[in-house]
Image (cartoon, rainbow, N blue to C red):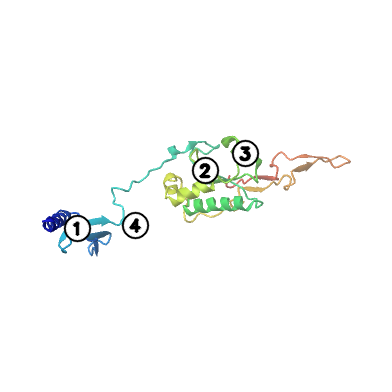
Amino acid sequence: MKKLKFASTINSLKQSGQAFHKSPSIKFPNQKNPSLDIYREEDEEGTPLKFHEIPDKENSKPTSESIETESISLSDFEEKCPPGGEDSVIFYTTSLRGIRKTFEDCNTIRFLLESFRISFQERDVSLHMEFRDELWRLLRGRAIPPKLFIKGRFIGGADEVVTLHEQGKLKTILEGIEVLSLNSAACNGCGNIRFVVCLNCNGSCKVFKDGDSEEIFIRCSECNENGLVKCPICC
C-alpha cells in the first residue's frame, strides 16, 4: 500500500509540473528581420509551445515617429545687439597670436562663416580698442574673443558655435543673411583687414609742430591707438 501511494504521488507531481518545467529556450535567427530574435520554448517531450520575438535594442533603428526634430530660431538666444548689428552678423576676433587657443578659435569661427559664404563684419579687438570696449559693454565684463552675434542676438564663443554647426543648427539661424556672390574678392585697400595705416601720421600716432626750436608733437586725432584708420573703401 505504501509503495502504491508513493508511486501515485510521483505521477501526480509529474503531471502537475509539466506546465512549469520547460527546457531551455532555443534561439532561431529571423531571416526577414535580423533585428528580431525568435525564441521557441519546448516542453519535456520536445513539443513546441509558443514563439517570442524580442527586439534587438542595439541593432534596431528608431522609427520616424520616435524621432523628434528640435527646431531652433534666433529668439532662443539672448538679445544683445552690437552697434550696427540689427540685421547683420558681427564677429569679434583678435589677430594676436599670444594665446594660441584664442587665435585658433577665432580662425575656426571665421572658417565656418566663410564656408557659408555670408556677409559678416569682423571686429578685431586687438586693432581697435573701441571694439574691445564695445564687446565688454555688451557682455558686461571682460570678454575674450571670439564672440559671435547674429541679428542682435548673442550666439556665443567657439564652443557654442561649433556645437551648433555639428547639430546642423548654425545654418538655420543664418537664414536671411546676405549671401556673397561667387565673384566677390578681398578689398583692394585693406585685404579685408578693415584698417589701413593713417596717412596723417604714417602710423606713429604723432603729429609734429613746425616753427619750434625743439621737436614738439601732439597726438594724431585721425587714427586709433595703433596708428590705424578704418578702410575708406570697405568700411
Of residues 87 and 80, the one nearer the viewer is 80
Relative side of 84 to 212, left or right: left
Q: Residue furthest right?
A: 213
Does residue 119 appear in the picture of this structure?
no
The residue that disc 1 covers is: 51
Q: Earlier in the sequence, mark 4 or mark 1?
A: 1
Relative side of 56 to 224, left or right: left
Q: Earlier in the sequence, mark 2 or mark 4?
A: 4
Label 3 vs label 4, nearer the camera: 4
Q: Earlier in the sequence, mark 3 or mark 1?
A: 1
Q: Earlier in the sequence, mark 2 or mark 1?
A: 1
Label 3 vs label 1, nearer the camera: 1
The residue that disc 4 covers is: 58
Q: Amino acid at mark 3?
A: Arg
The residue that disc 2 covers is: 156
- Callout 2: few (<14), some (14-19), or many (20+) C-alpha neighbours within 10 Å? some
The picture places residue 200, in percent across and down from the top left corner, at: 72, 44
Q: Amino acid at mark 1?
A: Phe
Q: CA distance from mark 2 to mark 1?
A: 55 Å
Q: Earlier in the sequence, mark 3 or mark 4?
A: 4
The residue that disc 3 covers is: 142
Q: CA distance from mark 2 to mark 3?
A: 14 Å
Give the position of the C terminus as an image quadrant: top right
Give the position of the N terminus as an image quadrant: bottom left
Circles 2 and 1: CB atoms closer than 8 Å: no
Of residues 104 and 21, the one nearer the viewer is 21
Circle 3 — which element?
A: loop
